[in-house]
Structures are given as C-alpha cells and as structure tokens.
Amino acid sequence: KLFDVTPGGQLKDSLVLDNSNSRPKFPPISFGTGIIGHVAQTKENVNIVNAYSDSRFNKEIDIRTGYQTKSLICQPIINSSGDVIGVAECVNKLTKESCFNEKDEQIFRKYLTFCGFCIQNAQLFQLSILEYKRYQLLLNIAKVIFEDTTNLVMMIKKIMEKTNTLLDIDKCRMYVMSRRFSHNGVEIAKDMFEAIYELEGGGNLSSELIKI
C-alpha cells in the first residue's frame, strides 16, 4: 500500500488510488528499483538535495502526478527483528534551504523506529483477527457435522458451503469413497469413489454417481 500524506489531508485521501476502479496510481515498486527499492534492499538512509540529478530517482511518479520533486529524504521502516516492513519518504523541505539536513535525518530515524514497532503490532493484531475468524469457522463446521448426521447430502452441502466461505472460491468438489462391506466374514474395500458432489458459487449442490 502507498500512503501519500500532505498537510491537512484526511486519512481516506492519503491512500493513493486512481479515480478509475480504485486502482493504484503508481506501479508496484520492486526491491532494488528506484530510491524506494534501493532503501528497502540496502536499509540505507538516503538524503538527496536535487532528486533529478540522482540516477536512482524515478521520474515516472512525478509525470503521473504532475508533482515536481526537488529534495527528498528516504529511510527504511524496520521491525523488531531487523526486517524491512516499509519505506518512508519525505519530499520537498519547506524552509529557505529547501533541503533536509543531518538533524532531520536523526529525527526521522528515531520516529520511524517507533513507527516500525507500531506497524508490526498492527499487522500482528490483524493476523490474529484473521486466525480467530478461521478457527471460528472451523468450529462452526464441526458443529454442523455433529448437528445432523442423518442426511449425507445435506451434511456435505453445509460442509462445502463453509469451505466456500473459508477459502473464497468459485467451485468446490467432494469425492466420497465407497463404503467398506463384508463378504464371508472378510472386510472388502472397493477402491473407487461412490459419488462426486459439486458446489458452485451460487450454492446449488449437484451429485453425480460414478457408474461401476
């Protein structure tokens, strides 16, 4: 995600999206590409007085936005494990010098250290919520299974509906093995599927019996 924050801007306006189909204005940036990618890859702090004189600077972003970048400072956002989880960039210093100094670098570095912990905690919390929802769904599936075991087709339908919800898919199939039976006291298993159940996104369950 890319956030473009300006003085007086609202949170909903800070996430940079195109007006059409809510797609990002900027193309994905790879590690090692441009100043952002360079900082992400090397964990270096970059302070540039004249952006257009630096070969790493990607002019495409300015072309797309109509904005002119002059000076910039770019630093990595690092988590508690020392891994890069983001990159922050400040553009065009609003002073007479119009460029960032060493004091700005120090302040920005200390601030991003704090930000790194905050972002990591938020990401972990988000993951914990997703895991909780998954476990809840699995518990609901187990509840459905033990709720009604008298109707095989309805039970399979409920299981597959929950599977669609869990994995967000268009179609789900379940292949049911043939039941074991006994012949002259000897248990025999037929290596084949007794039936195939298919559930599409619309929720219609169809059963197709395999011909022996």
Image: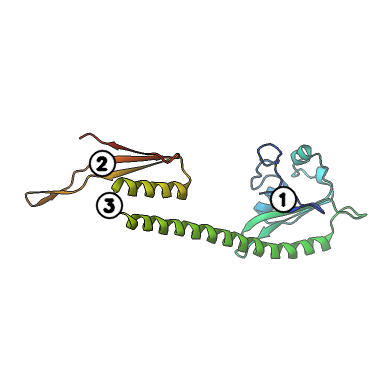
Horizontal side of 152 relative to 141 (left or right) equals left
Give whichever of 102, 69 is nearer the camera.
69
Give whichever of 109, 12 is nearer the camera.
12
Earlier along the polypeptide chain: callout 1 or callout 2? Answer: 1
Q: Residue at x 90, y 55 (%)?
A: 95
The amino acid type of the residue labelled 3 equals Thr
Q: Which residue is mark 2?
A: 193
CB under 8 Å between discs 1 and 3: no
The amino acid type of the residue labelled 1 equals Lys
Q: In the rendered image of this protein, does residue 20 appear above or below residue 154? A: above
Q: Residue at x 91, y 54 (%)?
A: 97
| Mark 3 element type | loop
The amino acid type of the residue labelled 2 equals Phe
| Label 1: how many Cα within 10 Å (few below 14, some 14–19, many 20+) | few
The answer to whether residue 71 is seen in the rendering is yes
Q: Residue at x 77, y 61 (%)?
A: 108
Q: Residue at x 42, y 50 (%)?
A: 162
Q: Which residue is mark 3?
A: 150
Question: What's the distance in space between the residues labelled 1 and 3, CA to CA?
Answer: 51 Å
| Mark 2 element type | strand
Q: Which mark is residue 12?
A: 1
Residue 174: image quadrant is top left
Horizontal side of 99 relative to 192 (left or right) equals right
| Residue 114 x/y as whole percent | 70, 65
| Residue 118 x/y as whole percent | 66, 63
| Residue 24 x/y as whole percent | 68, 42
Residue 62: image quadrant is top right
